[in-house]
Image: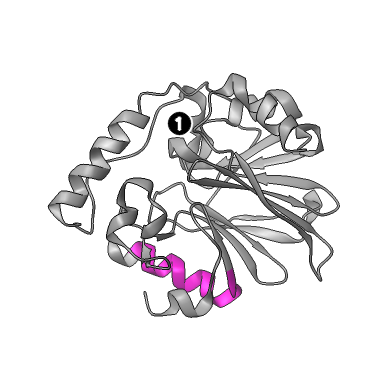
């Protein structure tokens, strides 16, 4: 695990980016503090030690937002909640997965990659899928209308952004900074595929419900955001993704 940055921007909130192997999680601290996604690669029992080594106090977290019900984004949610006492927020379509630890990650792609790349990725996911995910009961369940986070002390809102998953939500801050989960992915940051793509190879996520649903979600985000922080890799800008839709 690594802490990539710590900054206070013009809106007065602090951002810390945590990277677990190739998965990002974000701590956004305003009046209250929200953890956006939890990471999943380290074993739950190792999380407390990782956080202590990197100067992160889990008790500063008030809310945990799960961007979507894929194991690499909610795999450590139970341990984070145990350490922090934070309330867990997710979309209604993620509830079943959080409560059971079930993994919602298909191997069928709406967009078909090259056969070699597909097999490499599939084998990689088959290995990582073997991890067990401790279940957790979410505290706040939102619908397709999203959620205004101002009443929770965070200057932003949660938006429903289906496409990569039908449980996907994004956090859009008042300054037009967005935390997107996996709606968009830099293919270079997928560990097992990085040799095939140069850095900054942005794409609508390979794994998607259908082309139009994910494209519409990106169009919605472009109406309200200019800077984007994804679930994998480095931040990207409006110019990086406008061409995708």
Side of 127 relative to 226 (left or right): left
Task: Locate the C terminus and report the quarter of the image it occupies.
Answer: bottom left
Image location of residue 107, percent across then percent down: 24, 42
The residue depicted at 56 percent of the width and 30 percent of the height is 76
Residue 242 as seen in the image, left or right of residue 42: left
The colouring scheme, among rainbow, by chain, secondary structure or one colour, is one colour
Q: Which residues are magenta?
A: 213-227
Q: Relative to residue 226, is residue 141 depicted above or below? A: above
Q: Is residue 137 magenta?
A: no
Q: Quadrant of the N terminus?
A: top right
Q: Position of residue 17 (x, y in %)?
A: 65, 51
**Residue 28 in view:** yes
**As rendered, which of 112 and 63 lies closer to the eye?**
112
> Which residue is labeled 1 in the image?
97
Dot 1: few (<14), some (14–19), or many (≥20) neighbours within 10 Å?
many
Q: Is residue 28 above or below residue 172?
A: above
User: Which is more toward the observer, 238 or 50?
Assistant: 50
Q: Residue at x 44, y 65 (%)?
A: 217
| Residue at left offset 34%, top offset 55% | 194
In magenta stretch: residue 218: yes
Q: Residue furthest left?
A: 115
> Is 224 rendered above or below residue 49?
below
The image shows residue 78 at horizontal and vertical percentages of 60, 25
Among the 4 quarters of the image, the one containing residue 70: top left
Judge from the rendering whether residue 189 lies leftward or rightward of residue 79; answer left or right: left
Farthest residue, direction front: 195
Q: Residue at x 48, y 24 (%)?
A: 133
Instruction: Locate residue 192 relative to residue 200 in the image: left or right.
Output: left
Q: Position of residue 130 (x, y in %)?
A: 35, 24
Q: Is residue 107 visible?
A: no
* Quadrant hosting residue 49: top right
């Amino acid at each position: 695990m690594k802490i990539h940055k710590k900054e206070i921007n013009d809106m007065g909130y602090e951002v810390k980016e945590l990277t677990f192997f190739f998965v990002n999680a974000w701590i956004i601290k305003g009046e209250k503090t929200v953890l956006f996604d939890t990471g999943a690669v380290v074993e739950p029992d190792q999380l407390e030690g990782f956080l202590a080594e990197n100067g992160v106090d889990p008790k500063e977290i008030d809310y945990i937002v799960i961007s979507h019900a894929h194991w690499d984004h909610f795999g450590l949610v139970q341990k984070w909640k145990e350490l922090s006492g934070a309330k867990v927020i997710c979309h209604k379509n993620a509830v079943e997965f959080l409560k059971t630890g079930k993994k919602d990650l298909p191997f069928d792609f709406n967009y078909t990659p090259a056969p070699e790349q597909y097999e490499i990725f599939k084998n990689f996911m088959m290995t990582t899928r073997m991890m067990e995910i401790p279940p957790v009961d979410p505290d706040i369940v939102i619908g397709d209308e999203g959620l205004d986070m101002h009443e929770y002390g965070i200057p932003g809102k949660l938006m429903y952004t289906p496409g990569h998953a039908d449980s996907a939500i994004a956090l859009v801050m008042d300054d037009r900074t967005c935390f997107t989960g996996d709606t968009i992915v830099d293919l270079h940051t997928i560990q097992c595929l990085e040799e095939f793509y140069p850095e900054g190879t942005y794409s609508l996520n390979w794994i998607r419900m259908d082309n139009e649903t994910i494209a519409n979600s990106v169009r919605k985000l472009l109406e309200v955001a200019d800077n984007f922080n994804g679930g994998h890799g480095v931040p990207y800008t409006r110019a990086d993704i406008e061409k995708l839709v």
